[in-house]
Image (cartoon, grey):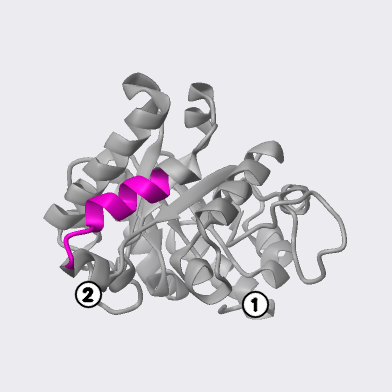
Amino acid sequence: MNRGGPDAADLARAVLAELGGKAPDEVDAALLPPFTALGAVGAAIGKSGLLLGAQDCHPGPEGANTGAVAAEMLAAWGCTLVLCGHSERRRDHGEDDKAVRARVGAALRAGIRPVLCVGETRTERDAGKTGAVLSRQVRAGVDGLAPEDATSLDVAYEPVWAIGTGKNATPEQAAEGHRTVREALAEAFGREPATAVRVIYGGSVNPGNAAALLAAPGVDGALVGGASLDAAAFAAIVRAAAPAKAGSARGGR
């Protein structure tokens, strides 16, 4: 809930300037502003190659749902991806696994790429429940999807204890979480289709740790939070993604 007015377009233009006017060919880079800034940011990035995304969507296509925004509406604004089940949505709005799965389905229905967010709290990690929590959230988030849907889905592993705390997971912890996510995807889709899903890391990613995290085994990109509010910092993370493994840098909260 930052940069929801005209300043969002200013930030998008600043990111573009830092990137030399266009997104690197090797990286899918997206900005995910608040709903109120989608039009302005979409106009600012134009045909630069930067993608436009949203932070949430409603499960239904239309109806008496005051204050909600449907995935079809996001598609009309040019969004190509949307977060589903971010930990702050789960925490602040009571979105359980069933609600998150409904949003994943809504995004796919609208032709938008869902980014299914999963992650454990500090209490769950300390209790040794990380694997169980991640497996449950992944399986619930893709329940009933067909193997061919794997090509249209991303999963973001965002350990809740690392979001906005400055205490990012180590590359080893990130790799461990990503292995668990990948195993759950293999159980849901089959091992070969599951390889099509990009699994990205989110949790206090910054220019200082991005290269190491992106180089960790199984980490296909980054979901960038606070660092995306600084154009130079976000651009540095995007550039770090290119040599790491031509993965994806996601951000723009």
**Secondary structure beneath label 1:** loop
Q: What residue appears at the point 37 percent right and 22 percent down from the top-left corner?
A: 190
List the residue tagged with mark 2.
167
Amino acid type for the residue under numbered disc 1: Gly
List the residue tagged with mark 1.
4
Front tag of 1 and 2: 2
Q: Is residue 251 magenta?
A: no
Q: What residue appears at the point 27 percent right and 39 percent down from the top-left corner?
A: 245
Q: Is residue 181 above or below residue 145?
A: below
Q: Which residues are magenta?
A: 127-138
Few, some or many C-alpha atoms within 10 Å of disc 2 (few <14, some 14-19, many ≥20)? few
**Where residue 43 sits: x, y (%)?**
71, 59
**Where residue 181 sits: x, y (%)?**
31, 43
**Where residue 107 sits: x, y (%)?**
64, 45
Q: Is residue 101 above or below residue 162?
A: above
**Secondary structure beneath label 2:** loop
Q: Nearer the viewer, residue 116 or 143?
A: 143
Q: Is residue 132 magenta?
A: yes
Amino acid type for the residue under numbered disc 2: Lys
Which quadrant of the view contains residue 202? Answer: bottom left
Magenta-drawn stretch, dominant element (helix, strand or loop): helix
Choose the circle earlier in sequence order: 1 or 2.
Answer: 1
